[in-house]
Image (tube, rainbow, N blue to C red):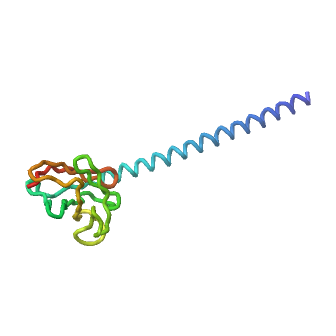
Amino acid sequence: MAGDGVSSLILLSASIVVALIVASAIFITALEMKDSMTNRAQLEENYMKSKLKIINDPAYTPYNLTTNTLTLYVKNIGTTILDMNTTSVILNGTAYSLTYDPAGSSTIKPLSGNVWAPQSVVVIKIKPNPKLQAGADYIATVVSSYGIKDSISFHVR
């Protein structure tokens, strides 16, 4: 009978160890799920707070045929600061990355200050390749942080 007690104790100890291992695995999985859900919720919150609007007049979008420069004015109408470094323009299917460098061929800069704060406007200048043609219609789409975007259709005069 003494052997039965030792066997029972060994089985009890083994089942406690197995239960602790299973509980640890479940706890770690739950923490990973919580972190993943927190990150996703933060992305969704940022997306919902972020909005932009191209405020050019579609009847007169500034394009200089001589210098091959298209100028777009884009307003942050959301409630959060937008990242100018992650903004790009898609012009008739061609993507243009923007830089804050005034000497670059595709630039972005705020009208005032140095951040794209809520209710502020940035000026985007791109040099399309190939050049835009007078009398043709084009579509420009500005895409910024969190995938927010706005488009404008315009006619080059």
Residue 71: quadrant of the picture: bottom left
Residue 66: quadrant of the picture: bottom left
Residue displayed at 55% across by 43% down: 30
The image position of residue 84, as x and y in percent, is 32, 62
Residue displayed at 24% across by 71% down: 112
Residue displayed at 17% across by 53% down: 132
The image position of residue 55, as x and y in percent, is 16, 58
Residue 115: quadrant of the picture: bottom left
- Point out the image quarter for the N terminus: top right
| Left or right, 62 with reference to 127 | left
**Nearer to the camera, 3 or 36:** 36
**Nearer to the camera, 36 or 124:** 124
The image position of residue 129, as x and y in percent, is 24, 54
The image position of residue 64, as x and y in percent, is 14, 62
**Nearer to the camera, 43 or 103:** 103
Hey, which residue is sitting farthest bottom in the picture?
113
In the image, is residue 109 above or below residue 53? below
